[in-house]
Image (cartoon, rainbow, N blue to C red):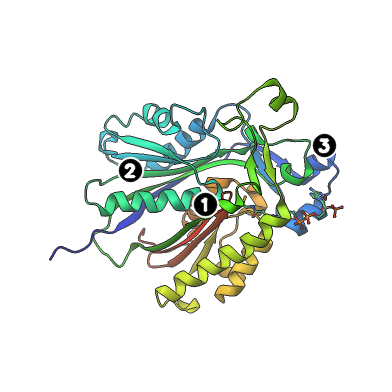
Amino acid sequence: MQNKIKAAITAVGMYVPDKVLDNKYFESIVDTNDEWIKTRTGISERRLMENGATSDMAVYAIEDMLKDKNFDRDEIDVIIVSTVTPDMFFPATACLVQEKIGANNAWGFDLSAACSGFLFALQTGASLIESGRYKKVIVVGSDKMSAITDYTDRNTCILFGDAASAVLLEPTEDDKYGIHDSILRVDGKGKEALYMKAGGSALPASHETVDNKLHYIYQDGKAVFKVAVKGMADVSVEIMEKNNLHSDEVAYLVPHQANLRIIDATAQRMGLSKDKVMINIDKYGNTTAATIPLCLTEYYRDGKLKKGDNLVLAAFGAGYTWGSMYLTWGMD
Ligand code: COA
């Protein structure tokens, strides 16, 4: 009997824009202060993409990922772009990325699952590899959150940043490594707690929607916080139990970075100390689909993430969407 094909991450890359917006900057534009932002969210800085769109950031991250890889771009089978800030409604950002990186034989699509987007896209990409039909799948999380942020709303503007990060999925020859399992969920009851009110088919763009600032992120922070803290922790514990994974065997929790308090609560429920949690929210804020692969890229390049490390990835976002994934890092 043939062994089940497994997917593993075999390359990582990232892009963050140069322009830094620190908490002092926000003190100058809305009624807030550094102390409030740091203690309530864990954020000190975030990045701003001044020139270019989501596809450009995705391309920079993919180029960074592919710079040490010696294969022909014609070998790339699929490009999955996770984003809530596509360059435009259509064509898909994946098409724009395909052209810019010269992946002549690829197909691809955008995947919209907000802050859980990377996790959903990674599982989708892994399933394509597991099917046996595809050998090289690029999964990129890219979000230009500044494009949909109202910089007069202190409730949301301090939270988000722009960034992109990519991973390459390939079949693994050693099935000790790679993506073992995931638990993914959606619940449309959350649809009005975190969303962009206008611009879609329910409420198309008009002078009125623009005047009423309906093309920006709306969030009922308190409501989302309550469900996020439970949802992310529940599903992280569930995947450990399902796979008989003890906290001693987990090298890192790799959480979506929306709020340090949500991350701390999840780690605590999993029985993990702080040094076993990947964090970048302090430097980049909430970069939506990019948070998790950014963590993986930076920790790997810093030598803190090693071959054989067991990881639990976890996210919660608009929709609601949430989930967790268990994988073993296979890169030397
Ligand atoms: N500076 C100062 N005060 C602020 C502020 C800011 N930037 N933003 C909000 N406040 C105020 C509020 O107006 C409120 O004042 P009030 O009590 O006079 O009405 C007070 O701070 C507390 O607001 P609250 O919303 O309860 O704060 P919080 O502790 O819940 O923190 C969030 C707000 C957004 C950081 C937090 O709710 C959160 O992280 N929510 C979940 C985010 C998430 O996980 N999203 C899903 C993935 S994107």
In the image shown, does 150 or 295 lie closer to the viewer? 150
Q: Kindly tell me whether mark 2's CB lies below 8 Å from ligand 1.
A: no
Question: Is residue 82 positioned above or below 206 on the image?
Answer: below
Q: Compare residues 91 and 296 and report the one nearer the observer.
A: 91
Q: Which disc is residue 69 wearing? A: 2
Report the side of 2 relative to 237 (left or right): left
- Marks 3 and 2 sit apart, C-alpha to C-alpha, by 44 Å
Q: Are marks 2 and 1 in contact (CB under 8 Å)?
A: no
User: In the drawing, what numbered circle is on residue 21?
Assistant: none
User: Which secondary structure, mark 3?
Assistant: helix
Q: Is residue 22 above or below residue 235?
A: above
Sequence-earlier tag: 1 or 3: 3
Q: Quadrant of the N terminus?
A: bottom left
**Where is residue 116 shown, x and y percent of the image?**
52, 52
Q: Nearer the viewer, mark 2 or mark 1?
A: 1
Residue 49: x and y in percent read 61, 33
Q: Secondary structure at mark 2?
A: loop
Up-down relation of residue 295 to residue 105 (above or below): below
Instruction: Name the N-terminal-most of marks 2 and 1.
Output: 2
Provide the residue designation for mark 1.
Answer: 116
How packed mark 1 is, by other alpha carbons closer than 10 Å (few <14, some 14-19, many 20 or more), is many
Q: Nearer the viewer, mark 1 or mark 3?
A: 1
Q: Which residue is mark 3?
A: 29
Whole-number angstrom distance, CA of label 2 to CA of label 1:
28 Å
Kindly state the secondary structure of the residue where label 1 is placed.
helix
- Residue type highlighted by circle 2: Lys
Question: Which quadrant would the C terminus be assigned to in this image?
Answer: bottom left
* Residue under the point 60% across and 58% down: 279
- Residue type at numbered disc 3: Ile
